[in-house]
Image: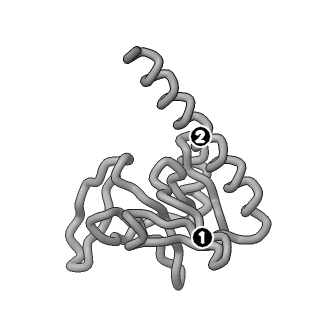
């Protein structure tokens, strides 16, 4: 994906690097561990393009890569990335869907750990 850097030059980033997309004042930003970049498109267009690839719209101002979410802070209603250095907001209407996804991911992870420990025995 080609994005714009602060100096106006372009940069190619890989899909795996994307933590989330956000919008602010009619501009779309791509957030990675390396920083944030401008993407010349709309959030709705991104949602359509990425919803089948593990991205979810968690509120009206972002589209989040669920596989890159480290944790969820229910009190502040935010998902955390990059050991808490970055975050995206979650609307109340999307909270239940997010919790269900994270619970399923945790369950899958514990099943993998059990399978690994059984294979070692």
Name the N-terminal-most of marks 2 and 1: 2
In this picture, residue 75 sits left or right of residue 82: right
Give the number of the disc on residue 73: 1
Q: Quadrant of residue 95?
A: bottom right
Residue at 49% over, 66% down:
80
Q: Quadrant of residue 38?
A: bottom left
Residue 110 location, x and y as percent? 55, 35
Give the number of the disc on residue 8: none
Quadrant where the C terminus lies?
Answer: top left
Scheme of colours in the image: one colour
Residue 74 location, x and y as percent? 66, 70
Residue on which disc 2 sits: 52
Q: How many numbered marks have been drawn onto this rendered protein structure?
A: 2
Q: Residue furthest front?
A: 121
In the foreground, 10 or 102: 102
Element marked by disc 1: strand
In the foreground, 45 or 57: 57
Task: Give the CA separation, mark 2 to mark 1.
Answer: 25 Å
Residue at 49% over, 21% down:
115
Disc 2 crowd, CA 10 A, few/some/many (<14, 14-19, 20+)? few
Residue at 30% over, 70% down:
35
In this picture, residue 89 sits left or right of residue 112: right
Q: Quadrant of residue 19?
A: bottom left
In this picture, residue 115 sits left or right of residue 3: right
Camera-nearest label, 2 or 1 = 1
Residue 97 location, x and y as percent? 73, 53
Residue at 51% over, 27% down:
114
Element marked by disc 2: helix
Residue 24 location, x and y as percent? 52, 81
């Amino acid at each position: 994906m080609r994005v714009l850097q602060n100096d106006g030059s372009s940069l190619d980033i890989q899909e795996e690097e994307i933590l989330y997309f956000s919008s602010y004042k009619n501009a779309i930003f791509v957030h990675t561990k390396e920083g944030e970049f401008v993407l010349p498109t709309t959030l709705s267009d991104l949602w359509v393009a990425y919803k089948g690839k593990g991205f979810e719209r968690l509120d009206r101002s972002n589209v989040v890569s669920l596989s890159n979410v480290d944790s969820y802070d229910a009190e502040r209603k935010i998902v955390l990335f990059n050991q808490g250095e970055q975050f995206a907001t979650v609307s109340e209407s999307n909270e239940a869907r997010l919790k269900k996804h994270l619970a399923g991911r945790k369950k899958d992870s514990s099943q993998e750990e059990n399978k690994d420990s059984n294979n070692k025995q």
